[in-house]
Amino acid sequence: MTLNPIDLAIFVVYVLGLIAVAFYVSREKAGHDKNTDDYFLAGHSLPWWAIGASLIAANISAEQIIGMSGSGYVLGLAIASYEWMAAITLIIVGKYFLPIFLKRKIYTMPQFLEQRFDSRVKTTMAIFWLAVYVFVNLTAVLWLGALAINTLTGLDLTYCMILLAALSLTYSLYGGLKAVAFTDIIQVVLLIAGGLFLSYMSLNLIGDGQGIIAGFDRLSSELPEKFDMILTPDSPHYVNLPGLSVLVGGMWIMNLSYWGFNQYIIQRTLAAKDLAEAQKGIAFAAFLKLLMPVIVVLPGIAAVLILPDLAKPDQAYPELMNLMPVGLKGLIFAALVAAILSSLASMTNSVATIFTMDLYKPRRPDGTQGHYVKVGRIVSLVALIVALVTAQPLLGKFDQAFQYIQEFTGFFTPGIVVLFLLGMFWKKTTANAALAATIGSAAISLAFKMIMPEVPFMDRVGLVFISCMALAILVTLVEKPEEHKNAVDLNDVDFKTQSNFNISALLVTLILIALYTTWW
């Protein structure tokens, strides 16, 4: 695919507009210099619509758009469980986790762990998250995003990665989280608009110009197997989506870890004006998650009829883009790049926040606010440079890099969920128990993988979670503690939610029930 000059012009206008908005929202009043609250938490000024949009923009990147479309091409609507189950997870996070985090007035997840346990737990998890964000997440988004752009434009992979890193830094390095969050609104609008139009054009093409309803009717009648949400054990794809585990098993653990305890996701909600605003933003993001399969999965299923002879499933989305008319192709390409940039900007800002606030500031407590902001900017730059240098050596040899990355992070996910759940809701949990769950997660995951390699990844995550939970409880009981001195006082936390959040939660639940009932 090559971009027409009109498509290229649309993309350039988008980039320039993005940079202009970032600098506009990042400007400071005369006489006021950015402090750590401004740079890392947007001055606690984010409204609900910016929080919701930014949550989705940080979550969706090129590898997910192209990868999930490819999965839709191969196994159908079942892959949408990753999106739809995330919607209900967001509601849980907003109802039960956010009140605790905001009550503690934290900047980072490691900071909460220090408040609840001790500095050992904080430092261990801070170093772990920094390593994962730089050497796993950032490298993945850069490498797989560059592969996507290379597929679409033919531009050299190295130049693609440099371009993505440079664009990300251009609009996020100066403004911090505020610039990231407010430009994410543009990113999400573009992502949804481009994705919906691609779905519309695909269904209309299948319906021979008779509209999307005719196209969807033909798609569902000719490919009924692509609309099975719960796969049976005889399905060749059961190992990736093992039946009911998507509803009651390991997917819950992965979602709770990602949406509830992941710094570069949860940081937006920590920057809210107040708890009610954060919860409205969470609810908005939940509704957007319900929409995402229409944008990224449905085109992949449609490609089975439109492009039945693809060499690789992941070519589905790029090849469909190639069918779009001039101008609209540029819009959809801009949407794809938008998804990559927002993820990069979010991750670098979170790396800077954790390093500065959890590792650097405790050792240099006498620094000025401006000094800490400068350190954060330097760390953002260094993190991206390191990711640029290491992306190809780390991921270039893998044919399915995204799957390897999921499996790697899945080794630690169960322990992280145990660490936070017990830390928040069981007052006796000790710091040693927290460390045992964290370290034990990797060891137990490796043992399960070696002893029972046939067990689906998602089921293994559930089994490791149960094991880590038992281990942490056992360590705590052996130590025979009273209530931990830093335990969360749940009586002091207001879990009541406003009527708009309650209505949103009910609607999300009812929509999910309807979706799974329809395509069970």
Image (spheres, rainbow, N blue to C red):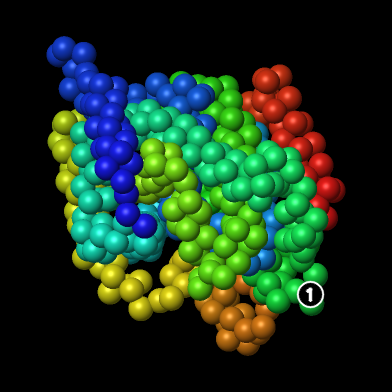
Q: Which residue lies furthest to the top in this view?
A: 30
In this view of the protein, can residue 155 be seen by the observer?
Answer: yes
Is 14 situated left or right of 297 in this image?
A: left
Report the front residue among 237 and 127.
Answer: 237
- Name the residue that disc number 1 marks: 233
Q: Which residue lies furthest to the bottom in this view?
A: 451
Report the front residue among 440 and 190.
Answer: 190
What percent of the width, then of the height, locates residue 514? Answer: 81, 42
Give the residue displayed 40% in from the left and 76% down from the top.
Answer: 398
Q: Quadrant of residue 28?
A: top left
What percent of the width, then of the height, locates residue 158? Answer: 22, 63
Please, what is the three-letter code of the amino acid marked with disc 1?
Pro
* Quadrant assignment for the N terminus: bottom left
What percent of the width, then of the height, locates residue 445? Answer: 57, 75
Report the front residue among 400 and 218.
Answer: 218
Report the front residue among 101 and 133.
Answer: 133
* Quadrant assignment for the C terminus: bottom right
Give the residue displayed 73% in from the left and 25% down from the top.
Answer: 503
Q: What element carries label 1?
A: loop
Q: In this view, does 41 lie above or below 233?
A: above
Give the residue displayed 24% in from the left and 26% down from the top.
Answer: 20
Q: Is residue 372 above or below residue 445?
A: above
Give the residue displayed 70% in from the left and 28% down from the top.
Answer: 504
Mark 1 crowdedness (10 Å alpha carbons): few <14, some 14-19, many ≥20? few
Is 190 situated left or right of 341 in this image?
A: right
Is 405 situated left or right of 427 in this image?
A: left
